[in-house]
Image (cartoon, rainbow, N blue to C red):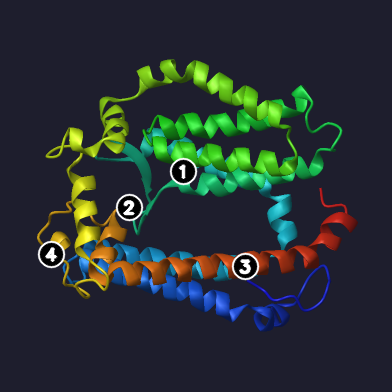
């Protein structure tokens, strides 16, 4: 977010504004506009519910992204545990007060928008584990008693999210937590042991899956097993991608999406709408643009590491 100007513990608001990596910010904004256009096309070229909701969410969270970037890193470090607890309480709130949609209870009604705490938990878990491993010495890192708390902190939200039920997000939360542990230096043998334990408990876990979850897994492996039922969405999405050809059918010209062959096109399948309209070339350009954005972020992150490292190591951050 910010370009490196000098190695110091803090910057004034003016310095931070001058140090903003505008290329990165503009790139994120452009990618957001592309997502709005894609959502606009799913509503048939009209400003309907899904488009309006997406526009509101984008500008709210983009504004939050800009505002939060001005907060000093020591705040996030010092409040990591509290942030995790707040997000965990929100997850508990979903269990008792959440909105139910399509058989899943995943959202909290904030009146002006619906909030999905499981998405926030991905961030909260990473912050918690990052601070915990920062305060744990290398000598104690792989001792069993120092592994107990991270395991509890990781498993608790996974169970809550999986029972919503949202198996996909639960797996992503697990992947995020395990990645932090691996980067912190936890030995491979513990991951191997966890993998064996997972395989041993897998038959039991499968028995707790709801029928639609089992169906989704089987459909993912073989969509043609139920072409007019569970596999319909996947099969039609592949047809939409293929029909786009090399250059696509043009903006708002996708037949698969406009004739409602893709009933849930505004969800994770929105890429198929983009592919049908802009074709193979458009998809490649979008992927390259996204990879460039990730590269810019990684470069920015590395520069910030060198700027903040002296502060974290030399000022006794709790």
Image height of 243 relative to 230, above or below: below
The answer to whether any part of residue 81 appears in the image is no
The quadrant of the picture occupied by the N terminus is bottom right
Residue count near mark 2 (Cα–Cα under 10 Å), binned few <14, some 14–19, many ≥20? few
Residue 261 is labelled as none
Residue 69 is labelled as 3
SS at mark 4 in the image: helix
Where is residue 148? Give x, y as percent.
Answer: 69, 25
Mark-to-mark CA distance, 4 and 3: 42 Å
Image height of 192 relative to 181, above or below: above
Where is residue 317? Give x, y as percent.
Answer: 82, 52
Q: Is residue 84 left or right of residue 217?
A: right
Q: Earlier in the sequence, mark 2 or mark 1?
A: 1
Q: Earlier in the sequence, mark 2 or mark 3?
A: 3
Mark-to-mark CA distance, 2 and 1: 16 Å
Mark-to-mark CA distance, 2 and 4: 19 Å
Residue 118 is labelled as 1
Mark-to-mark CA distance, 1 and 3: 22 Å
Q: Circles 1 and 3: CB distance less than 8 Å?
A: no
Where is residue 92? Give x, y as percent.
Answer: 47, 35
Residue 255 is labelled as 4
SS at mark 1 in the image: helix
Q: Circles 2 and 3: CB distance less than 8 Å?
A: no
Q: Residue at x 75, y 77 (%)?
A: 12
Q: Earlier in the sequence, mark 4 or mark 3?
A: 3
Residue mark closest to the camera, 2 vs 4: 4
Mark-to-mark CA distance, 2 and 3: 28 Å
Image height of 133 relative to 278, above or below: above
Q: Circles 2 and 4: CB distance less than 8 Å?
A: no
- State the image quarter where residue 139 is shown: top right
Residue mark closest to the camera, 4 vs 3: 4
């Amino acid at each position: 977010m910010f370009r490196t100007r000098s190695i110091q513990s803090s910057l004034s608001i003016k310095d931070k504004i001058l140090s903003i990596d505008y290329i990165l910010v503009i790139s994120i904004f452009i990618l957001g506009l592309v997502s709005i256009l894609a959502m606009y096309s799913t509503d048939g070229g009209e400003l309907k519910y899904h488009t309006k909701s997406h526009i509101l969410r984008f500008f709210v969270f983009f504004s939050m992204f800009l505002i939060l970037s001005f907060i000093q890193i020591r705040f996030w470090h010092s409040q990591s545990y509290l942030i995790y607890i707040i997000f965990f309480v929100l997850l508990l709130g979903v269990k008792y007060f959440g909105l139910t949609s399509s058989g899943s209870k995943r959202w909290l009604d904030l009146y002006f928008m619906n909030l999905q705490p499981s998405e926030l938990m991905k961030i909260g878990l990473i912050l918690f584990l990052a601070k915990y491993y920062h305060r744990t010495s290398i000598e104690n890192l792989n001792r069993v008693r120092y592994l107990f708390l991270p395991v509890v902190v990781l498993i608790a939200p996974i169970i809550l999210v999986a029972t919503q039920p949202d198996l996909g997000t639960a797996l992503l939360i697990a992947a995020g937590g395990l990645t932090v542990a691996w980067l912190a230096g936890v030995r491979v043998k513990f991951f191997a042991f966890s993998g064996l334990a997972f395989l041993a408990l897998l038959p039991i876990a499968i028995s707790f899956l709801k029928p639609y979850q089992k169906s989704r897994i089987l459909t993912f492996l073989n969509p043609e097993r139920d072409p007019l039922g569970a596999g319909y969405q996947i099969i039609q999405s592949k047809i939409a991608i293929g029909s786009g050809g090399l250059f696509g059918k043009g903006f708002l010209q996708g037949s698969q999406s406009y004739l409602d062959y893709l009933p849930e096109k505004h969800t994770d399948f929105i890429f198929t709408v983009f592919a049908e309209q802009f074709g193979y070339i458009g998809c490649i350009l979008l992927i390259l643009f996204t990879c460039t954005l990730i590269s810019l972020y990684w470069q920015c992150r590395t520069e910030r590491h060198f700027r903040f490292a002296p502060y974290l190591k030399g000022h006794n951050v709790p």
